Amino acid sequence: MSDDKKARVRAIAERRYENERGEMVPILSEEEVYNLLISRGTLNDEERIVINGHMVQTIRMLEALPFPRHLRRVPEYAGGHHEKMDGSGYPKGIYAGDMSVPARIMAIADVFEALTAQDRPYKKGKALSEAMRIMGFMKRDNHLDPNLFDIFVQSGTYRRYAETYLPPELIDEVDEAALLAIEPKTFDLPEDEARKSRWAQFLPEYEATIRD
């Protein structure tokens, strides 16, 4: 929601009407105004913290399991698929250089499966070209590892998956050259000390929201 539309909502909220008890009350409650003034998506800050908390639960559950030595990094791989290359992801807010290659691969697989999945009750799966176009934007915005995404494209992995799991009518032509030509936005990588995990900050916020 843009700033001018937010201002319009606030202006409407100042209007009053007479209820059945003869009281003059606002058209919108404070809670209704708060929930309407969402800049992007449909979740307010508290709801987003709860949704993002699924990664906290993933990491906690997996770290509690007695994995054999060769699987000891599974919690990292499974718990990092919402991290971003520029450190703006969650829950730990780590940067690309601090993420393992399998964790970055997992992020690409997770996004692709989420975009194309046919079994989600809240949305329809997207056509192959649309899913890849969206992932191209995510490459540009440093959500996905650009080099690994290019390998995902060049290797044809996305198409082999589609031919196995997607309905034929959703398998269309993908402009691979355009995807490979996308240049990620530049960003400043902080010094090692400044790249400490945001996990310690996010965790209390999440737990406080769950308690409330």
Image (tube, helix red, strand yellow):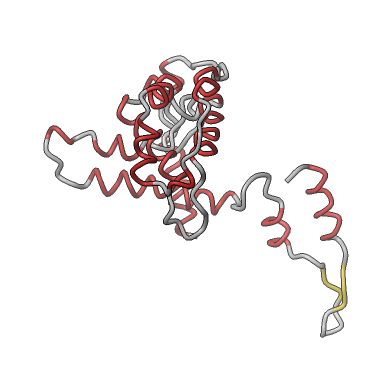
Q: Which residue corresponds to the image point at 50% horizontal and 48% vertical from the top-left?
A: 49
Q: How many marks?
A: 0
In the image, 13: left or right of 132? right
Viewer-side residue, 167 vs 42: 167
Viewer-side residue, 129 vs 106: 129
**Residue 91, percent from left and from top:** 43, 39
Q: Which residue corresponds to the image point at 47% horizontal and 53% vertical from the top-left?
A: 208
In the image, 30: left or right of 168? right
Quarter assignment of residue 192? top left
In the image, 146: left or right of 23? left
**57 lies above or below 83:** below
The extreme bottom residue here reads 21
**195 lies above or below 124:** above
Quarter assignment of residue 40? top right
**Residue 20, percent from left and from top:** 82, 84
**172 lies above or below 13:** above
Q: Which residue corresponds to the image point at 54% horizontal and 35% vertical from the top-left?
A: 134
Quarter assignment of residue 22? bottom right
**2 lies above or below 142:** below
**Residue 190, percent from left and from top:** 49, 17
